[in-house]
Amino acid sequence: MNVKYIDLINQTFYFPQEEFTLDKDRLLFHNIDLMKLVEQYGTPLKFTYLPQISNNISKAKTWFRKAMEKHKYEGKYHYCYCTKSSHFKYVMDEAFKNDIHVETSSAFDINIVEQLLKEKTISKKTYVICNGFKRDLYIENIARLMNNGHKNTIPIIDNYEELDLLSAAIDGDFNVGIRIASEEEPKFEFYTSRLGIGYKNIVPFYRKNIQENPKVKLKMLHFFINTGIRDTAYYWNELLKCLKVYIALKKECPTLDSLNIGGGFPIKNSLAFNYDYEYMVDEIINQIKIACDDAEVDVPDIFTEFGSFTVGESGGAIYKVLQQKQQNDREKWNMIDSSFITTLPDTWAINKRFVMLAVNRWTETYERVLLGGLTCDSDDYYNSEQNLNAIYLPKYNKEKPLYIGFFNTGAYQETISGQGGIHHCLIPQPKHILIDRDKNGIVATEVFSEQQSADDVMKILGYNK
């Protein structure tokens, strides 16, 4: 009988996969023995595998280059990293090794951009695409960046008032983009995105506020789909509507030369994940080329803003199963040594799934369990399949510790949970390590942040001054 955990994985998925392999009964992630990390650093443990950031950037650049060559597309491609996915310096340092650009979403982002410029991590050739609803401080910071000589800054107009505010704060002429308020998927509770300007209002806005304005040039049309770039009728329909607006604008505005197809690529959330990235890029480029050729306008330069795709697949978390609680005749709860709300808040907030695998004991028999976190909140649990409400792991044995890993957790989790902050039920933030490889491929690790101590928490709460 095939009753071992490894049998279950092999029967259910194609395994091994590019990033997941086995060494006997231990899981390797990009050929890194995760049990060795556990033995060295303990659990709970969060890690970031830095080379994966560059790997994904390189893949996307290759897909767009191939598609543009195939379709004889004369525009350029610019890869932007949207900082909101992870603002950490170690992410920026790795990402900007790859000659990419940056997309911001709020005022403090500009302070990060200025620091990156100061350290020469980016240069004046780097495009800074400024998205988001712009309050006074954000306007002030954008203006400071541009007035100090960073001419490749492009504020994206999100609402009608922003253009006047920017004009008053920025010295000399400057480029802008306009964000389209795309329609949301039918399942949404509202019809149109709260961000941007409606399809029908963009050309009139240009005519009234930009066309005769000697200080402002329209360079970019920004198109963003909240659910990301997916092969659905909804996505292709919105893209074609966007192209109609681009063509109408281009015929009146010769300075318009860029289309920002915001909205990211999905990342693997299961070993059964299947997404044809190369096909999607090819078809996007093909559709833009067809629409522009038919309208006899020049094709635009293409900008993308990939956040989760850039950094998501670099992250992971490892927990130890502390104990198993048999709550009734059917439900066994494996209690982990941390909290899902604290360390993987998207599992609690939006029922997000991550790749979840046992780290050790793959050659032993498995059982059906639920995973519970340490807080007293009834929502502090994880289920990998909504229809099953349970997961499978090697059988609990208090004499043989079981470790489990969650993978592709690198986007948003630290910022949502609040790095270094207070967490639900005061469950401490786990230790976080960075994993890199040198020129010879040798793995090196370093501690980015230690696990929170009681003193850290007491100081934040105001007990220790």
Image (cartoon, grey):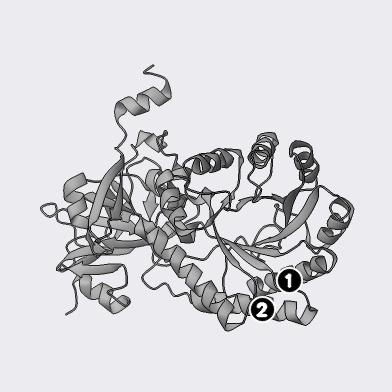
Residue 339 position in % (x across, y down): 35, 45
- Of the 4 image quadrants, the one containing the N terminus is bottom left
Please rate how many residues cluster around mark 2, counting C-alpha atoms within 10 Å: few if below 14, some from 14 to 19, many from 20.
some
For the image, the number of numbered tags is: 2
Q: Residue furthest top?
A: 465
For disc 1, the marked residue is 243
Can see residue 181? no
Left-right relation of 303 to 20? right
- Tell whether label 2 touches label 1 (CB within 8 Å): yes
Residue drawn where x is 40% and y is 55% of the image: 409
- Of the 4 image quadrants, the one containing the C terminus is top left
Residue 329 position in % (x across, y down): 26, 59
For disc 2, the marked residue is 287
Residue 21 position in % (x across, y down): 24, 69
Can you say whether 291 is above or below 138 in the image? Answer: below
Can you say whether 268 is above or below 378 in the image? Answer: below
**Which residue is more in the foreground, 224 or 74?**
74
**Which residue is more in the foreground, 124 or 73?**
124
Left-right relation of 352 to 168? left
Left-right relation of 71 to 254? left
Residue drawn where x is 41% and y is 53% of the image: 94
**Which residue is more in the foreground, 247 or 370?**
247
Amino acid identity at mark 1 = Leu
